[in-house]
Image (cartoon, rainbow, N blue to C red):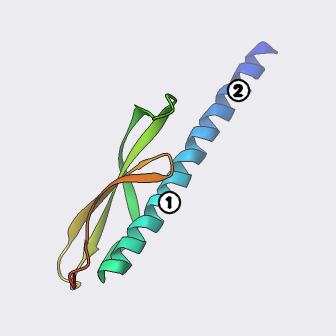
Amino acid sequence: MPTMLIVMIVGSVAFAFWSAGRGAAERAEVLGREACTAAGVQLLDQTVHVMGMRLYRGDDGWLGWERTFRFDYSRDGEDRHVGRLVLRGGRMVSFVGPVDQTI
């Protein structure tokens, strides 16, 4: 009986971790898509890819996950550039990618 309880707890923790990762990936995709739209470029592959994760300590002292995502974009359909964004929780803290060329 205790073995089943341990398996259920481990399974619940694994599901919560996976679910939080999917939520962060969806948030990163929205931010990448909005950045590409604002810059007038095309988001290639219509997705972002996680490059890495690490623990960080927030301003409140709690530990959290910092996730780095990459995405590809094109200015004219012929070239391919790499963008990168970093999320801490649901907040974007770093962005490297397309910028509006009309400014």
Quarter in which the C terminus is drawn:
bottom left
Q: Position of residue 12 (x, y in %)?
A: 68, 34
Task: Judge whether residue 46 can be spotted in this image.
Answer: no
Residue at the image point whose x is 42% and y is 50% from the top: 87
Q: Relative to 33, is 18 on the left or the right?
A: right
As drawn, 21 above or below 11: below
- Give the residue at mark 2: 9
Residue type for callout 2: Ile
Is the C-beta separation of discs 2 and 1 under 8 Å?
no
Q: Give the Cα separation between the discs numbered 2 and 1.
A: 27 Å
Mark 2 vs mark 1: which is more N-terminal? Answer: 2
Q: Position of residue 102 (x, y in %)?
A: 22, 85
Q: Relative to 43, is 9 on the left or the right?
A: right
**Residues packed near mark 1 inside 10 Å, few (<14), some (14 to 19) or many (20 plus):** some
Residue farthest toward the top in the current orientation of the protein:
2
In the depicted view, which residue is nearer to us: 80 or 87? 87
Quarter in which the N terminus is drawn:
top right
Dot 2 lies on which element? helix
In the depicted view, which residue is nearer to us: 56 or 60? 60
Check residue 27 in the rendering and tell me which mark sits there, or answer none.
1
Residue at the image point whose x is 46% and y is 35% from the top: 59
Task: Judge whether residue 18 can be spotted in this image.
Answer: yes
In the depicted view, which residue is nearer to us: 14 or 3? 14
**Residues packed near mark 2 inside 10 Å, few (<14), some (14 to 19) or many (20 plus):** few
Residue type for callout 1: Arg
